[in-house]
Each structure stands twice: as structure tokens, then as C-alpha cells.
Amino acid sequence: MQIDTEKCTGCGFCVRDCPVEAVRLVKKKAVINEQRCTGCGVCLRVCEALAVTAEEMPPEGTLQCDACPIKCRIHSGYMGACHRYRNEDGQLVRITALHCFEDVAAIVGPDPAEAIRKPVVTAIGAGTTYPDCKPAPHILKENRQGVDVVTVVTEVPLSYSSVIVKVDTDIPLGKEGDRILAGKREVGMVETEQYGSKMLHIGGVNRMTGKNGFAVARTVTDIANRRPVKLKIENGGRLLLQVGHPPVIDGKQAVKMRVGCGSATMGLFAPILVEAADEVIILDSHITGQMSRHVAGQFAGARPTGVQLKFKESTPGRYFGDHGDGWGGTSISQPADVIRAVDMTVARAAMTILITETTGQNGAMFEVRQDGKLAQRALTKKARAALNAISNSCEPSRVSAIYTAGAGGSARAGVTRYPIKLTRAVHAGKAYLTVGGAPGFVLPGGGITFMVDVERVKDGSFYWTPTPATICPLEYTMEVKDYEKMGGHVEAMKPFDAKKPVAK
């Protein structure tokens, strides 16, 4: 990289963001340590004054890393931008040694003992511990292969609760932070996007205890129980969501979840795509892929095409897309509009260009004319085969949800006289938390905050009460000896007989 000191304003962005600390300020001007610099391009991308330019030829004596699209050029004795690889006397060496499980076992920690991984009985239909000091409604024990195990169950009201809804689709729903409405009442907000999915957060204690609390509690419960729910995104679409089913967005049912971003799709299918056309563009709102410049396309034999895209290039063949109602969740509704120009000094007349998206559901083929203009033509047999390969590798679009909550006082005091000991036992794996029999994931840190996949809980097991709060079937299972040590309500403990109904 080179810096024009006349243009440099000394803003410091390049110093702040350089991953290998190759840039520093001298007399309020940026200078580069050429030995440290890997040519990663961060300074080029963050410089608002356009003072940084890339060198046309890689520096002598550097070693190119191919571990990611950046392709760092690393000087001997220095490491790449990701801090994983170092050039040691002309050899690319992984800095951290390969670890066996035994190397990390102490950090990972032990799994709960097999004897306590399943509850003696679930909390579905168990009743509630209220008030807090009252023992749980059922404290049942049994012997499992010589180990005395006890499960304490309660249907616990939780104001600190919500559902994280995952909608597998590329169809835009709304922007991050947009409010989610049930009718005219706010019940949640749009969160970030995951790999081919939109994430919605419904509920939370502040909404649950706010003016729309009853609507919030009802919506969380309905989603957790896999019932259909109608929602509206502020400034976005109207949704009909039901866990386990495809989402309906503005009256249209979504069909496919993308197989990957545009770059990943290129990497997965490059050998097929290179046979389908001279150039392939995979439109995607996050990373649009271009075969001729992408490392996967070049690996598969793609040649330069002179096709230039409108989107901003991140690394070769990978472009930051935009968001809209067009192909691949971009603003491109007419596929050829993604092409800014065709350099005919590189392109070839009659060269073919295939444009598709990450689900392969849409596809268009063009031919480059002598004057550099594009003429649309019918999809060829190989082009259709490539689109089918992408589409057939996509999972169906569907809705899923994670119920998350913090187990409060009644959920702990009803188990033991010393709630802190239960909390510590849960985090240590001595007490195993389940929800309707389904394994719960306990978040690290203080308290007992947990998550559970609602599709692993019997439908209809969640309720809400107009305090307002949601009600969740919660079980703690542990060895009887550990239960006694934590001050458990052993006087209320009863043996479980699977042949007899549990007494109410």
C-alpha cells in the first residue's frame, strides 16, 4: 500500500483499523511500515481522503497466504492480517498448534452425568410454585443403574422471557431496529440477519411490563406453542408466522432458504457454473459473487471477462450488495442492471453471462455483442442444470423459534432453601435444566438464564398469565446426594412410580 501525504488528513482511521499495526501517524500524517504491511486493503477501504492506493506488483520476498479471500502478502518473520499465519523463512506456518480435545477439556468442562440428563417427570401439567417459599409441586426420585436421582418440577411464571424467531428467507422483512407490531401494539423488534435468515425478537421484560404487556405475553406464548401469528414490521412487510411452517410475507409464501451467500454459492458450485457460462454473477444482498474474479471461479478455470459490477468490491469477486425487493434481496429487479460496464478489450463477442441468486430460483442469460451491449437469450441446458443444482441444495424456507427466559425466585426457592447453590450446580453441570423434557442451554454468567428450541417441547406447554408473564414447564434433575447438599426440600421428595399417575 502507498499513502499520498499530500492527500492524507491524519484522521487516524487507517491506524485504528489496521489489523497488523502497520500504519502509524508521524507529524499528523499516516506512514506505513512496509515489513508489517500485508496488503490486506483495510487502510484503502477506510481512507475517506482517498490517500491510499494499492501497489500493482506484490512486494518482493513476500509469501502469499490463501487461507481466505484477502490473500495477504506476508514478509518473512511477520504474520497475516488474521493473526493466524506467519511467514517463517518462506514457509507459511499456522501460529497456533492443532489442539486435541484433551488440550481444551478443562476449559470446555464436563458434561452432566448420564444419570441426570433426562428428568424423572416433566413439568408439563405440574402446577406452579407460588409463593416463592413454597416447595415445588412435584419432587420425585428414582434409582437409575444404582444412582439415586431426583427431579424438581414447576410451571414457572416468567416476566423475564421472550422468543427469538428465525425466519429462513432472503425476502426483506425490515431494517434492524424496526418495531414489530401485533395489531397496533409493539411486541418486539427486528434484529440482525443470520446465514439466510432474518431474526426477530419478541418480548423481553421491558415490553412485558410495559403498556402492551398482555399482547406481548400472548404473542410470545402463541409462537412458543407453534400457533400461527400475524405480525407487521414497521416500515416493512406483513407476516404470517408459524413455527415449523414456511413464512407468509405480504401474502406470498416463501419457498427456499439460500444455500449460502453469493460468494459461498460461487465456491460451492464453481465447477458447474464455469461450464454454464463464460461469466456468472450471483446476486446477494450481503456478498454478491462474480465468477471470473472470484478465487473459486479462477480455481475452476474461469477466464477474465471484463465485466464490471455496480456494487462495491470487498475482495476479488466478492461485492457488498444492497437491500431491496429485487433478486437475492438486492435492489436489482432487472438482472442486467447489476453490470456497470463491459470492457471489450478483455471481453469477447458472443461471450455469455448467467445471472442468478443464492436460491437458484431466478436465472437470466445474456450474450455480449460486438459493441459491448447485452442481448438476452434463452437459458441453455447447462445453465438450467446449474440453477437446478443450486436450488436443489437449498433447504425449504421455514420458521423456527427459541424461547429464552431467566428463572426467577420461585423457580429456585421452590427447589432448594439455598437458591445460590442451585444456580452454581446448574452452571457446574451438577443439576441439569430441561424444559418440558427438552434440553435447555444455560447462558454463562450469573443467574439461570436459559434457551430452548420450542419444537422440542410438546405443543401447548407454554401459557401466559395477566401479571403479565409467560409460563414455562421447567425441570431440574440431579443426584439425590447433591440435592441434599444444596438444602433441597427432601421432606417433600417422593418416589416415582411410572405405573401410577402422579398425584396432584
Image (cartoon, helix red, strand yellow):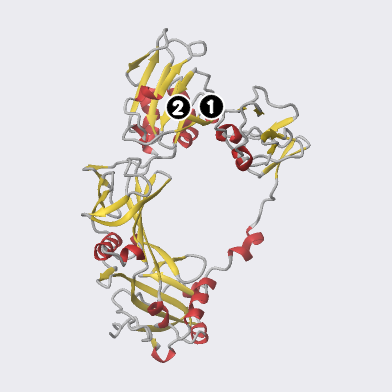
* Vertical side of 419 occupied by 252: above or below: above
**Residue found at the far top of this picture:** 370
Q: Residue sitting at 34 percent across and 65 percent down? A: 457
Tell me which amino acid carries mark 2: Leu
Q: Position of residue 148 (x, y in %)?
A: 48, 83
Q: Position of residue 181 (x, y in %)?
A: 26, 53
Q: Which residue carries the number 2 mark? A: 273
Residue in front for this viewpoint, 149 or 144: 149
Residue 18: quarter of image: top right
Task: Please indicate whether residue 249 sits to the left or right of residue 82 in the image.
Answer: left
Q: State the separation of the CA atoms marked 2 and 1.
A: 9 Å
Task: Please indicate whether residue 181 sits to the left or right of residue 453 in the image.
Answer: left
Residue in front for this viewpoint, 418 or 272: 418
**Residue found at the far right of this picture:** 89
Q: In which quarter of the image is the N terminus?
A: top right
Residue 300's disc number: 1
Numbered disc 2: secondary structure = helix
The first of marks 2 and 1 along the sequence is 2
Q: Can residue 120 be seen in this view?
A: no
